[in-house]
Image: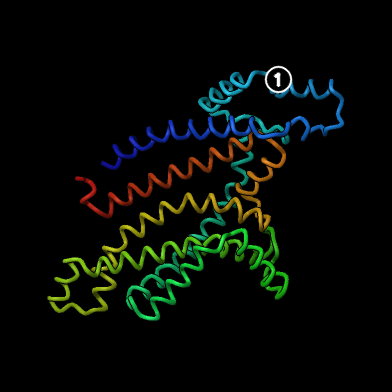
Amino acid sequence: MFGQIMVTRLLQAIPTLIGVATLVFFLLHLVPGDPVDALLGESAMAADREALRQALGLDQPILVQYGGYLSGLASGDWGMSLVDQRPVLALIIERLPATAQLAGVSLLLAVMLALPLGYWAARHAGKKEDVAAMGFSLLGVSIPNFWLGPMLMLFFAVFLGWLPVSGMDQPGSIVLPAITLGTALAAVLSRMARSSWLEAMSMDATRTARAFGVSEQKIWWTHAARLAAIPVITMFALQLGAVLGGAVITETVFDWPGLGLLTIEAIQRRDYPLVQGCVLMIAAFYVLANLLADLLGLWLDPRQRHG
């Protein structure tokens, strides 16, 4: 069952990734600006500009460039960076460990915050504790990363001097980026945990356990927690792709040398092949996150296997 679904989802992902690659390719060529100007400067001689344009293949019709790009992808060639003159895939792979480290710490922080907060809100549903917990969650969802990051930087790095301002070379440099990236995810997961826990407590399984004299604490942490885990884990898997997308802003704010910062640098330098490669990699992570969510749902809930 898992293998069949995985193959089906992977086959469905192919047209999605081709669509993303096509959309990004044509959008980049519609954006005003010339990569030759970015490389040589606007004061360069016309002959030098034309020679570079021919060397990069930018003098070809756009459909010819598009066909060459897709055929390259099919053969595993993601193209060459216009600025660094290195393979795009190699540049992306160099930056992935930094992004993976930031995403991993952010996800861990989000889970450590979300589960206790969701449990606390569900256990005191309708009371002031519930209102306070969900108010904190609403605050986390509402604050954008591009505002929270600089505020944390100003207070903890500039004013208090406890943590580094940016980069990843100093001890503790991951703390502020991880808080910035993990806060929104913690808010989403805590709200999901609260609603799932309350729904699980109203199911027949928990009512039966209560009728058999099982203690309330055990019902919350065994029977209800097991039922509530399915939607929470599914949501967690779906948020993996969102974390990678959010890393673009967070890495830019904190000068974190990951895939997100590489994407922004490539856009600023009009490095078309590198931008296409970065966006394609992020889209691939989204597809894999959705596949992981589907498989986790099937594994945790046997009813879905026969649905």
The residue positioned 84% from the left and 20% from the top of the image is: 47
Badge 1: residue crowd in 10 Å (few <14, some 14–19, many ≥20): some
Mark 1: secondary structure:
loop
- Give the amino acid type for the residue marked by disc 1 in the picture: Asp
Compared across the picture, whether 84 is left or right of 46 comes to: left
Q: Quadrant of the N terminus?
A: top left
Residue 187: x and y in percent read 46, 65
Count of marks, rendered view: 1
* Residue 66, quarter of picture: top right
Which residue is nearer to you in this view: 66 or 113? 66
Which residue is nearer to you in this view: 292 or 276? 276
The residue positioned 43% from the left and 31% from the top of the image is: 15
The residue labelled by disc 1 is: 59
Residue 61: x and y in percent read 64, 18
Q: Quadrant of the C terminus?
A: top left
Compared across the picture, whether 56 is left or right of 178 comes to: right
Which residue is nearer to you in this view: 74 or 93? 74
- Picture layout, residue 33 above or below residue 300: above
* Residue 5, quarter of picture: top left
Residue 103: x and y in percent read 53, 56
- Picture layout, residue 100 above or below residue 202: above
